[in-house]
Image (cartoon, rainbow, N blue to C red):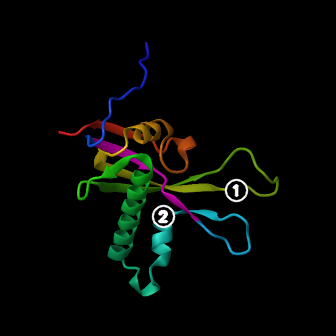
Amino acid sequence: KTRPFAPVLHAGQRLRFRLRAVASRWEPQPGKKRGRRMDVVHFAWNRLPPDARTPEMVEAAAERAALEWLARQGDRCGFCPMDGSVSVLGYDLTHLWPERQRDRTTKEEISFGALTYEGELTVTDPAAFRIMLADGLGAARAYGNGLMQIAPAP
């Protein structure tokens, strides 16, 4: 027997969460109508000057970009990550080769970087937050990314 998913949420409620999401942004492409989706971590890495690409700087830029992306999503989706409580646990780059091909001569590889977050958040808009819980966050949701797990905060 299944139960309907109907969490009781209210503004100001604190929740623990865990999220695996593909954080991306649209980058304009000169001369083209549509931009290109780009991983926020790779975007942050590419913006570092070549002489500043030390392992520590690369890691700091990736974490900053990941947390900024989560904060922007929170503004849109009815939650606010609690400062200092959110951790980026990992970044996994996944490569897939689709079975079907658009063009018979080449196969296009699908790749995306998934970030794993864990921490606490505050619900700011229960209706928007409930929609986000059902729809998910970020790209590559068809591959199992973007669903947030929640639990009451202690």
Furthest-right residue in view? 104
Q: Residue at x 39, y 26 (%)?
A: 6
**Image quadrant occupied by the N terminus:** top left
Nearest to N terminus: mark 1 or mark 2: 2
Q: Mark 1 belongs to which amino acid?
A: Glu
Name the residue that disc number 1 marks: 108
- The answer to if 25 sits in the magenta stretch is yes
Image coordinates of residue 78 in percent, x first then y, are: 39, 46
Can you tell which mark lies on residue 70? Answer: none
Q: CA distance from mark 1 to mark 2?
A: 21 Å
**Where does the magenta region start and end?**
16-26
Name the residue that disc number 2 marks: 40
Find residue 9 and report its image quarter: top left
**Height in image: 99 above or below 152?**
below
Q: Residue at x 28, y 49 (%)?
A: 119
* Mark 1 neighbour density, 10 Å: few (under 14) some (14–19) many (20 or more): few
**Height in image: 149 above or below 68?**
above
